[in-house]
């Protein structure tokens, strides 16, 4: 009987630790080892008419809440979330203090390079994008939102394995 109580208690503690890993902010999220944005990223560029020019270099691209609304999708559109881009993209909702977000980042870097020219991967810091995060119902991180022209966005919560993410890219973004 004692063994089953210890097992149950261990399981409850383990689940609690997993759930809390991304629900509480770390004290020092400004230290370099906690900063995901150190990944080489490019800035949003526009042409002479002010139109967005997508960067298909394969590098992860940090995007602000204002840029998200201007170039990805308007969150107040009565017709719903309609992707404004012409190249499919993934938006990674993350936070510097989130350990699973750190674990996912190298996979995103690798897949950005692999699918260079076919998709764009953006990173949106939820601590600086509260309005967009709420509009998309981001309740846990990492959360990935997949956007494809003329399609409804798709959502994936958690840090998927590389193979699972590749399948999602193939099924959600690269199929006609």
Image (cartoon, grey):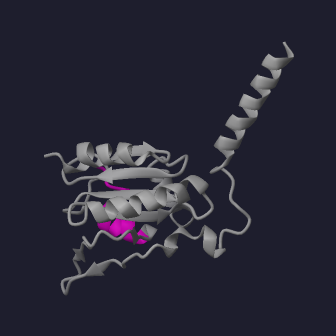
Q: Quadrant of residue 83?
A: bottom left
Q: Quadrant of the N terminus?
A: top right
> At which x and y percent is residue 54?
24, 72
> At which x and y percent is residue 137?
48, 46
Of 163 and 50, the residue lying toward us: 163
At x 39% / y 64%, what residue is drawn? 109
At x 29% / y 49%, what residue is drawn? 169
Of 81 and 9, the residue lying toward us: 9
**34 relative to 151, above or below:** below
> At which x and y percent is residue 157?
47, 44
Q: Is 77 a magenta residue?
A: yes
Which region of the structure is painted magenta?
A: 66-78
**93 relative to 53, above or below:** above
> At which x and y percent is residue 31?
66, 74
- Is 123 displayed left or right of 56 in the figure? right
- Is 176 displayed left or right of 110 in the figure? left
At x 56% / y 61%, what residue is drawn? 95
Q: How many marks?
A: 0
Considering every residue shown, the one lying at the far left of the view is 176
**62 relative to 3, above or below:** below
At x 24% / y 53%, what residue is drawn? 148
Q: Is residue 35 visible?
A: yes
Q: Quadrant of residue 132?
A: bottom left
**3 relative to 26, above or below:** above
Of 141 and 103, the residue lying toward us: 103
Q: Is 70 a magenta residue?
A: yes
């Amino acid at each position: 009987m004692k063994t089953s109580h210890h097992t149950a208690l261990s399981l409850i503690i383990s689940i609690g630790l997993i759930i809390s890993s991304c629900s509480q902010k770390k004290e020092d999220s400004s230290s370099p080892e906690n900063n995901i944005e150190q990944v080489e990223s490019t800035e949003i560029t526009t042409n002479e008419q002010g139109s967005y020019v997508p960067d298909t270099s394969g590098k992860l691209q940090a995007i602000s809440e204002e840029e998200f609304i201007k170039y990805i999708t308007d969150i107040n559109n009565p017709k719903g979330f309609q992707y404004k881009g012409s190249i499919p993209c993934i938006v990674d909702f993350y936070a510097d203090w989130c350990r699973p977000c750190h674990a996912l980042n190298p996979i995103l870097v690798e897949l950005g390079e692999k699918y260079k020219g076919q998709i764009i991967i953006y990173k949106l810091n939820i601590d600086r994008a509260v309005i967009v995060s709420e509009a998309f119902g981001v309740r846990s991180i990492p959360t990935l939102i997949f956007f494809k022209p003329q399609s409804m966005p798709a959502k994936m919560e958690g840090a998927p394995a590389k193979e699972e993410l590749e399948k999602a890219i193939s099924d959600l973004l690269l199929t006609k």
